[in-house]
Image (spheres, grey):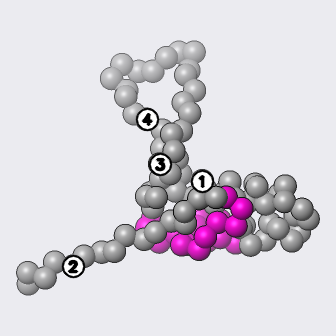
């Protein structure tokens, strides 16, 4: 999974006024969408006072992190692979 956005498609709503000519941009999911979905799922998994705090802490850490530095802990309720950080390769040609 990319650290910038979810690979799943994001539905697009069409405006009654249409789109400006030449506008072919596509919506991208926020990098923390999956963490937010995990929190929402936790609300329906028993006592929310016990199920929500863990996923919410990971969501909050994700929102406060810089792109590429999101938490890599597994999701609590979603059956998705946890995000991975890309290794930065340094140029050794100094």
Residue 30 higher or lower than 16, as above or below: below
Distance between mark 2 and mark 4 Cα atoms: 32 Å
- The quarter holding residue 53 reads bottom right
Tag on residue 33?
Answer: 1
Check disc 2 and report the residue beneath it.
90
Check disc 4 and report the residue beneath it.
26
Please identify, in this view, whether the residue under mark 1 or under mark 3 is nearer the observer: 3
Task: Tell me: 62 left or right of 22.
Answer: right
Q: Is residue 64 visible?
A: no
Residue 58 among magenta residues: yes
Residue 88 higher or lower than 10, as above or below: below
Disc 1 crowd rating (10 Å Cα; few below 14, some 14-19, many 20+) is some
Q: Position of residue 40 (x, y in %)?
A: 75, 54
Tag on residue 7?
Answer: 3
Distance between mark 3 and mark 4 Cα atoms: 13 Å
Mark 4 secondary-structure assignment: loop
Distance between mark 1 and mark 3 Cα atoms: 11 Å
What residue is shown at x 76% (from left), y 55% (from top)? 41
What residue is shown at x 46% (from left), y 58% (from top)? 1
Mark 3 or 2, nearer chain start = 3
Q: Which residues are magenta?
A: 57-78
Mark 3 or 4, nearer chain start = 3
Task: Tell me: 89 left or right of 22.
Answer: left
Mark 1 or 4, nearer chain start = 4
Disc 2 crowd rating (10 Å Cα; few below 14, some 14-19, many 20+) is few
Residue 19 or residue 29, whichever sits in front: 29
Dot 2 and dot 4 residues touching (CB under 8 Å): no
Q: Can you say which quadrant of the picture contains the C terminus?
A: bottom left
């Amino acid at each position: 999974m990319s650290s910038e956005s979810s690979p799943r498609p994001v539905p697009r709503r069409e405006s009654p006024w249409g789109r400006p000519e030449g506008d072919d941009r596509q919506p991208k999911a926020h990098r923390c969408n999956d963490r937010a979905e995990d929190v929402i799922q936790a609300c329906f998994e028993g006592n929310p006072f016990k199920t929500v705090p863990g996923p919410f802490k990971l969501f909050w850490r994700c929102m406060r992190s810089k792109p590429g530095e999101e938490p890599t802990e597994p999701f609590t309720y979603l059956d998705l692979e946890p995000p991975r950080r890309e290794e930065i390769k340094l140029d050794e040609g100094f």
